[in-house]
Image (cartoon, coloured by chain):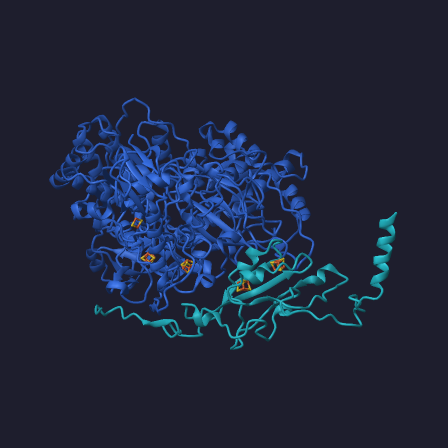
Chain colours: A blue, B cyan
Amino acid sequence: MPKIFIDNTSYEVKAGKNVLEACLTLGFDLPYFCWHPAMGSVGACRQCAVKVYKDENDTSGKIIMSCMEGVRDGMHLSIDDKAAKAFREQVIEWLMTNHPHDCPVCDEGGSCHLQDMTVMTGHDYRRYDYKKRTYVNQYLGPFIHHEMNRCIQCYRCVRFYKDYAGGKDLNVFAAHNHVYFGREKDGTLESPFSGNLAEVCPTGVFTDKTLRQHYTRKWDLTSAPSVCQHCSVGCNTIAGERYGGLRNIVNRYNAEVNGYFLCDRGRFGYEFVNSENRITKPQVMHQAVDENALMHHLETVLTNHSLIGIGSPRASMESNFALLDLVGKENFFCGVYNEEMMLERRITDILDSGKIPVASLKQIEDADAVVILGEDIWNTAPMMALAVRQSVMKTGGREATEKTPMPEWHELAVKELQQNTKGFMVNVTVTETSLDEIASLNINAAPDDIARLGFAIANHIHPSLELKNFEEAVLAKAKTIADELLKCSNPVIITGTSCYNDPVLRAAFDIAAALKAAGKAPAIAFVVPECNSMGLAMMRGHAFDTAVRRVNREPNVTAVILEQDLYRNLPAGIVDEFLSKCRNIIVLDSLNNATTEKAHVLIPASTFAEGDGTLISYEGRAQRYYQVYVPDNKYIRESWKWLSRMKMIISGKANGHDPHHDSVISSLETALRQFAGISAAAPSSGFSIHGEQIPREPHRYSGRTAMLANRNVSEPKPVADGDSPLSFTMEGYQGTPPSSAIPFFWKPGWNSPQAVNKYQQEIGGDLIGGNPGVRLFVKSSGNMPEFFKDYPEHFRERQNKWLLLPQSHVFGSDELSVYSAGIAGRSPEPYMGLSPVDAKMLDVTEGSQVTIKSEKEEYSFPVKIVESLRNGIVLVSKGLPGTQGMSWGNWVELAK
Amino acid sequence: MFSHFRTMWLVFLHLFRKKVTIQYPEEKVQLHPRYKGRIVLTKDPDGGERCVGCYLCSAACPVDCIALQATQDENGRRYPEFFRINFSRCIFCGFCEDACPTYAIQLIPDFEMGEYKRQDLVFEKEDLLINSQGKYPGYNFYKVAGMDAGVKQKGHGANEELPVDVHSLLP
Ligand code: SF4
Ligand code: SF4
Ligand code: SF4
Ligand code: SF4
Ligand code: FES
């Protein structure tokens, strides 16, 4: 460890870092703009100046940019030096010559890095008496607001948007002191990662347009640590509330999961919480009732009937378990069809065996090769796609800097050396995807053929199968891929359920297993459809088909359906049949949908914002989300609270009290051993620091004595939270809370999100106290994995039949996020993709309507001709209006 | 003993001094314009609402008795959707006025705010907004801010250059 001297005090720092990172890690407040921990240094802003000295006898020293200088053993530097300080103050003064007088109307204000740095350097008085430069703004779509006058030319936006996230439609224009950051012309920012601009830009040029609709300053938000509900990646978020409405979602740093970023579906998809479509009152037979009447009615329908429960892939573990606890294990079903269930079971079996470790996003970023088998992760797990991009770029960078050593943080120099060198990534998918452009090899094939290629790769790495009837071309491709993989040390294999094909999953496992056998350290990632699909699969309930058979057999069934629209994931005919056979239908959900319409008893459930819960991400990481605020509407409660009430009704032990979160989690741990350890995902509700709780509100929270004064001038007593160590007030422990319970990032002098520096063990590294979440799958066991040997037959087109596969869309395919107007506006019209040959055979052209006939349903969509699609497959947009309940992975007929 | 008499004597002398007590409410008090009494929201010289809903007053208020919600019109001009002051909590410290970057919120020389019911001391925007510039005439925030909120176009402020032509590379 190099030892450096800062203002004559010696410190041990980590080798290979730059001076700025080292100083920030040591806790110094050194201002900066252009350097970003995830993007490195470019030395553009000149803000991070310090003085370095030749040795301890040098007294004059020279000013350097700390972000551009690596730490050296015995280095002497000064942050407090007068000249360095004056330099930093002057840089801000220059930046401010053109800065508009905007703070009061700027959405960045109060969480503005420029404000923070200005205060930090001490600049406070404008001496420059000339006119300010101005710019015209652009319309950038529904998510991002543009106010170019506020720019300080740090280049972070384009570095993130283009270099880090691969976006194409944001750039820098003009020259000298006129540089302009925007699009070529007005229009929606296309990248699904555009929302990060609001956090990456240190000023108010790019701000969250959805927050603007109900603008609240950071200091006025009641916030809680949360987990994104819109895919299986489980990014950590912070959700903020004011006046009973959810106001925004921002990133919550987790070094192993989402790091500094979120995708736009997660950031802007929160508005379903404020939706008009929320269920607000309990209903019995479509009549709103009060709690007494509800309980009374529940007593009749719950007793004297046999109970079954339908668990949900988008409800928390607590709610699913409370349902299982209510109905009993043998009566617990999942709202998932048998085929999908088998896939998820395969995944949990593989992960449970512990033979191959699961790859976190961080591990994907650090992987030196990536193989994607059959999953369009750009659309089904966007942040995973961003991680894959980093793997490709970083590996390329490492290769380039092998010959000419260059520290990783030296962004521009590394890019210059790297040119187009990229890491190895193979993207084997059904059709073209947005990741194609960075892949070393793109292969589009039918699911069975994807699997065959996978098995062939595995066989090349570690001959274990006898490959029969494999085409030469496939074997040759497999060999190239296998040879490349054998050059790597920690490759990651990514696959998922989107192909509705079990062999694909097995092939992915076999590649990983073969790599392990070859002495590599592979990891694997299985993308599943929903935010808690993994948790539900781990509960090992029966598939929905069994439930249908059950109600067909048994006449007197009360079904309790948890937080899901069965009509979305299952064919309408089957759901109709199921619901018509149930004597009583109890539905708990937060939003009205086709299933809630059929409910005899409808119970309003809380969303993630009004309740506590734990979700299990694709990596088996259990992560806790906390209630953000107490809704005015007392009927809105977590499903697990309602379900526990129901249990009390049955057992006759109703005492009018809701159970506490701790007790639900500990019963889950005892009842289902596979969830042992889940309680460690968050501190228990009794947790306190020096007897104090963790406040959800910053100490500057305003309006306490006026917010509710219109209703009653006497302030109500703050509500106590029996379920978590967080309080609904601004009073409490002001220091750093445990990493899984950080409601907002703030430290004195650091109001912007970049306060996260102070919560990390080292800059860009793990949070103090470790990263949030516990991984429930055991660590890799030493045993050599056994291979799956049953590769499928070559995909064959069928006469007049097509294999129906989903095309996911970042915007639109997720059930809840489309309630945000911006996301709905960006979701495409549903279409049906056909190969050119198939289209010709059916005699249809782009745009003509074609009808899909499955067992019971018929759907009609306009055709889109997809060049990269194999013949014999029909692709349909997933989850969009009109495409619900399709039998993915089945063979369907098409008719003009 | 002596000090007792001295005190009585001094009190007695006060009988001949000028009286400071006035017969309020028959007689009205003369207050300076800087007196910190009832709070108002003022308008700019062009008759627009001055408050831009920046939340600085509410953050500055030591008793947290200001609550508001910012919103904006079709030109992007910010204004408070509601603005509430709970005068039963206000200590008339004037911090809100000091914090306000637009001269919108001002404390005026009026203290006659007695009410029988505490609830009546909760003032909404309708009760606070006056049709005057108050103590600070002539200031219109949007004329000096960089934003175009329908008051002046980009680059047309007194302190601004015309917008940059992005297509030009000339110096
Ligand atoms: S970017 Fe920051 S400093 Fe500039 S106007 Fe906005 S809040 Fe103020
Ligand atoms: S727009 Fe923001 S991020 Fe981009 S250069 Fe300007 S200040 Fe930096
Ligand atoms: S005068 Fe003081 S107490 Fe009253 S509203 Fe203003 S800041 Fe708050
Ligand atoms: S400080 Fe002034 S402009 Fe800002 S919200 Fe208060 S009254 Fe309005
Ligand atoms: S942070 Fe070092 S020059 Fe910008």
Would you say A632 lies left or right of A541 here? Answer: right
x and y, in percent, of residue A74 in the image? 27, 33
Residue A210 showing in the rendered view: yes
Q: Is A363 drawn above or below residue A126 in the view shown?
A: above
In terms of image quadrants, where is residue B64? Answer: bottom right
Toward the top, the furthest residue is A783
Residue A494 showing in the rendered view: no
Looking at this view, is A347 or A271 the one in front?
A271
Would you say A164 lies left or right of A613 here? Answer: left
Would you say A459 lies left or right of A682 here? Answer: left
x and y, in percent, of residue A772 in the image? 43, 37
Looking at this view, is A684 or A557 the one in front?
A684
In which quadrant of the rendered image does the C terminus of chain A lie? bottom left
Q: For the point 64% across and 33% down, which residue is it?
A: A651
Toward the front, the furthest residue is B2
x and y, in percent, of residue A73 in the image? 26, 33
In which quadrant of the rendered image does the N terminus of chain A lie? top left
x and y, in percent, of residue A580 in the image? 52, 48
Q: For the point 68% across and 37% down, which residue is it?
A: A655
Q: For the point 63% across and 61% down, which residue is it?
A: B85
In terms of image quadrants, where is residue A451? Answer: top left
Q: Is A392 drawn above or below residue B162 in the view shown?
A: above
Q: Is B59 drawn above or below residue B156 in the view shown?
A: above
